[in-house]
Image (spheres, grey):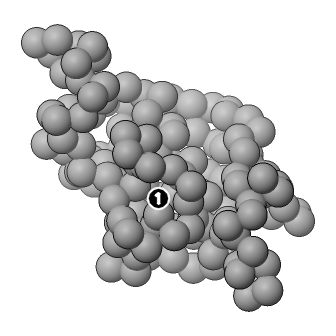
Amino acid sequence: MLYNVVEIQEILPHRYPFLLVDRITALEPGVMIEGYKNVSISEPVFQGHFPGHPIYPGVMIIEGMAQAGGVLAFKSMDAKNQEDTKNKVVYFMSIDKAKFRKPVVPGDRLVYRLNVIKNKGAVWHLDAKAYVDEKLVAEAELKAMIVDK
């Protein structure tokens, strides 16, 4: 484990119920990141999605991958800029080629694996994939930008 949820909260501004990364398990600045979220039936989203047949929403999977990408972007900044992360935030620019392959349900461990396709300045283009039990459940190409708050 590289970062637990408390350490992730020092990097990202997200908080319950919208912090969707529990741990970061691998990170190579400027190259890749791996982390996960334990999907629990106690999450508020399951009250309405769907009663009696809980499915973790695809949009939440995309957001979780994006949050992991935010950690990658922040931890890839040079040391001077990393000190300034409290004054920065990562904004989505685009989501392309999103596909959902298999439903994610309570009890699953959702593993996010992201690789950098391209980085130019504050803009990051990422290949994002999500797995449960090593089976691909979702994928997308994400673009994001680090900006001042």
Where residue 78 sits in the image (x, y, percent)? 77, 84
Residue type at numbered disc 1: Arg
Q: In this orientation, which residue lies closer to the viewer: 133 or 87?
A: 87
Q: Is residue 93 above or below residue 112?
A: above
Where the N terminus falls, by quadrant? bottom left
Which residue is tagged 1? 113
- Quadrant location of residue 34? bottom left
Residue at (51, 38) in percent of width and height: 62
Residue at (18, 41) in percent of width and height: 40
Q: Is residue 39 above or below residue 87?
A: above
Image check: 64 left or right of 69?
Answer: left
Q: In this orientation, which residue lies closer to the viewer: 125 or 79?
A: 79
Q: Is residue 63 visible?
A: yes
Where residue 125 sits in the image (x, y, percent)? 74, 53
Q: Is residue 139 visible?
A: no
Where residue 26 sits in the image (x, y, percent)? 44, 75
Residue at (24, 34) in percent of width and height: 43
Q: In this orientation, which residue lies closer to the viewer: 47 or 144?
A: 47
Q: What secondary structure is marked by label 1? A: strand
Q: Residue furthest bottom?
A: 79
Where residue 63 sits in the image (x, y, percent)? 51, 40
Residue at (47, 64) in percent of width and height: 9
Dot 1 crowding, Cα within 10 Å, few <14, some 14–19, many 20+: many
Image check: 94 left or right of 2?
Answer: right
